[in-house]
Image: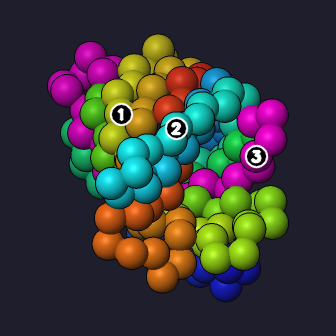
Amino acid sequence: MKKLLFIAAIAVCGLAKVNAQETSFGVTAGYLNVSEKVDLGDEGSLSDSQSGFYVGALVDIGISDAFHVQPEVLYGKTSDLSFIYVPILAKYYFGESGFHVMAGPQASLSLDEAPEGFSSFGVDIAAGVGYDINENFFVEARYGFEITNRIKDAPDNVSDKLNTFNVGVGYKF
């Protein structure tokens, strides 16, 4: 897992060098909600939700006026869980309004010890909306839908997935 985070950090630095004139670094923080859904097949399903916060760093790479790529590294904490998230989001801006939509893959790593038979690593599809208040401050909201099953060697109709919702503010330097 450390290798994955190292590779992500190298990729972020490499992408930042590609178009350095339109690249900005920033920080972000806000509200985090993690919901777990366990599907037990014919026996029904269970769900739980926990709230907390997230903080992190980002690189906003302007490819064109309307299209940006934004890799991030985020730490998330709820009452019982701690995570590292690494989203790589494509952002599309609507003219010069400051409004944008974003979507992309997101890796999530639980920092807590996973029970036997469970994986601490997951892959999500994240999507959201945002608004740049000015060239430094922004607000965003996004949802991460997990596509991997956290239960190792699970039968076809049994799964455990962690979805995330976050709303926050940020500052670009």
Q: Secondary structure at mark 3?
A: loop
Q: Secondary structure at mark 2?
A: strand
Judging depth in this view, the residue of 154 and 89 nearest the camera is 154
Q: Residues within 10 Å of mark 2 (few under 14, many from 20)?
A: few
Res 68 visible = no
Q: Name the residue tied to disc 1.
A: 128
Q: Secondary structure at mark 1?
A: strand
Q: Is residue 111 above or below residue 126?
A: below
Q: Are marks 3 and 1 in contact (CB under 8 Å)?
A: no
Q: CA distance from mark 3 to mark 2?
A: 15 Å
Give the quadrant of residue 79: top right
Judging depth in this view, the residue of 91 and 40 nearest the camera is 40
Q: Position of residue 132 (x, y in %)?
A: 43, 22
Q: Amino acid at mark 1?
A: Gly
Q: Name the residue tied to disc 2.
A: 47
Q: Position of residue 9 (x, y in %)?
A: 63, 71
| The magenta segment | 78-99
Please tell me whether mark 1 or mark 2 is closer to you in this view: 2
Please tell me whether mark 3 or mark 1 is closer to you in this view: 3
Please tell me whether mark 3 or mark 2 is closer to you in this view: 2
Give the quadrant of residue 120: bottom right
Q: CA distance from mark 3 to mark 1?
A: 23 Å
Q: Name the residue tied to disc 3.
A: 81
